[in-house]
Amino acid sequence: MSLFRKKNIHQILKTVEANEGSSTLKKHLRVRDLTAFGIAAIIGAGIFSTIGQASAAGGPGVVFLFVFTAIACGFAAFCYAEFASMVPVSGSAYTYSYVAFGELFAWIIGWALIMEYAIGNIVVAISWSGYFASLLDHIHLPFWGLQNGIHLPEWSGIDYFSAQRAYDAAIANPADASLLQSEGYLAWIGAPVIAGIKFILDIPALVINVLITWLVYRGIKETRNASNIMVVIKLAVVALVIGCGFFYVNTANWSPFMPEGVAGILAGVSAVFFAYIGFDAISTTAEECHDPQRDLPRGMMYSIIICTVLYVLIALVLTGMVNYKNLAVDDPLAFAFSEVGLNWISGVIAISAVVAMASVLLVFQMGQPRIWMSMSRDGLLPKRFASIHPKFGTPGFSTIITGVLVGVPILFIDLNTVVDLCSIGTLFAFILVCGGVLMLQSNKDLPRKFKVPYINGKIIVPVLFVILTGYLFKYQSGWFNDNVNPLVNTDAIPMFIFFVVFLAMAIASILKNLSLIPVLGMLTCLYLMAQIHIKNWIGFTVWLIIGLVIYFSYSYRHSKLNASNFTN
């Protein structure tokens, strides 16, 4: 029973060449389109909300955090780029793990990627609904009788169980006036009743999910065109924000530049990192690129560089326009411009936020079906998931299932339930891709049009470990005991795992001359995972166990690498 049977890169490339011109995906993407997809995925809620929280925590010095996080993402992007040049197929991290670690790990990462793409899109759709409702509230058209905006009923913008919990909380604490005015309570008492059941559902989230699913189903060319249009709109608004805001910068607000020191800057590390998530989704379009081995690495790198420059400029403008302490709000861009009397820009920002979130939804909704398609080709999922629409040239069945998987949970899952699970699944994928590059670094015969620059980590990694642990033991012993020792605090288990892996990588670097960039990619992503509460690690573990049950009950027996399938 071989759980770690691997796919051969040369066989994969021969299969791809043999399928050229047959019933495969249509090739419409070039570097410009891939860069646009990357920008579409990265610039989303982060630039409209989390940038304010990070700035409030770290002050103007948060720009260093954006640069640091870009470097951390760059480590993972380098590894994705090398794999994309070796294995130009649509499986992304799933296929890369199949080549590097074997089938069991490939299944685990494929199952984990459902959290990043499909389940992550639940978060995006719900967030989009909130931005859309806010946009309607700001529409003032007296000529049409809309003096005070368009207000959707509360019951049409929230899930059923969140409304029920809000109602129960308000009934249990009737003296708390804020609970009686909450969206959930108002939704529950104002909802229509059909067949004895209160009709409460997030209609805008469902509608945008259906529209995006339809667009992705129609074809990659249509998806590309829509993404490019939305990216142009986003970049135009970002340029407007930077250009107009520049004239209202008060340099006195930049002093002190790091008011809370390094600790304050690092307080926003998780929020800022997740503002970059999404660049990896473009690797799922490999089979729709004219030259994936050349264009995918460039598209990933270009998108990260462009977004980093924009993030840094916006952070400088925001913290220059208003004091950083006032930016801990949900809509920091609109808030900053209202503070300097430019209220008209708030409407423009609201429109851009709706477009930005829709583009994120588009890219993620495009990625998930292609992961399933690759898994189905390998026999790990039923053949139907690999079927290509004869007219549109897209994985039609998988696209529809993705839309259903996103749409149904919108009816009953609240935002906070899935945010951290989405993040931990993404980081796990990044870690395995970086590890996969390390596994294959000694194989010189593999075809590579792009290779991660080799820097010997034999000295650097152990020195970093010694410096970090030495500093913590000497100057932060209390913090180390509370946050790393699982015998004192069970919540410290993730950070304990980080230090154990750090030590193992330091030893491995000495013994095997490991490449520095993939090692740093693994460690930075694992550190960010360690910042996520242990309850989410438990939830992620349960999710993986469910996946393993499916693997051993179906996928292992139906795998095309199963010896019995070769003889049947």
Image (cartoon, helix red, strand yellow):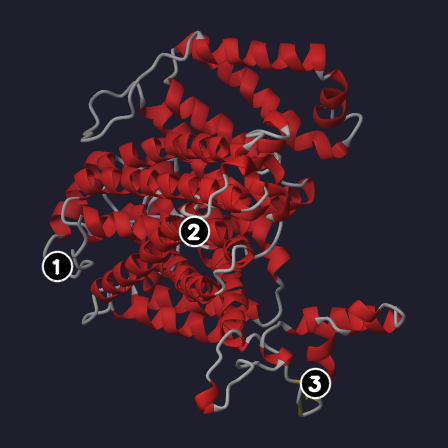
Q: CA distance from mark 1 to mark 2?
A: 26 Å
Going from N to C along the chain, the mark reached first, 1 or 2, is 1
Mark 2: secondary structure: helix
Q: Where the N terminus falls, by quadrant? A: top left
Q: Nearer the viewer, mark 3 or mark 2?
A: 3
Going from N to C along the chain, the mark reached first, 1 or 3, is 1
x%, y% of residue 126?
A: 54, 65
Mark 1: secondary structure: loop
Crowding at dot 3, Cα within 10 Å, few <14 / some 14-19 / many 20+, comes out as some
Question: Which residue was labeled with disc 1?
Answer: 22
Q: Nearer the viewer, mark 1 or mark 3?
A: 3
Q: Image point 41% across, 13% down: which residue?
A: 457
Q: Image point 56% across, 74% down: which residue?
A: 202
Residue 304 visible in the shown view: yes
Amino acid tagged 1: Ser
Amino acid tagged 2: Ser
Residue 263, disc:
none
Relative to 144, does residue 417 appear above or below in the rendering? above
Question: Which residue was labeled with disc 2?
Answer: 555
Q: CA distance from mark 3 to mark 2?
A: 47 Å
Residue 190, disc:
3
Relative to 461, does residue 55 appear above or below in the rendering? below
Q: Image point 27% across, 40% down: which residue?
A: 302
| 155 left or right, relative to 296 | right
Q: CA distance from mark 1 to mark 3?
A: 55 Å
Residue 379 visible in the shown view: no
- Seen as rendered, the residue at the extreme left is 21
x%, y% of residue 39?
A: 33, 49
Amino acid tagged 3: Gly
x%, y% of residue 125?
A: 49, 65
Crowding at dot 1, Cα within 10 Å, few <14 / some 14-19 / many 20+, comes out as few
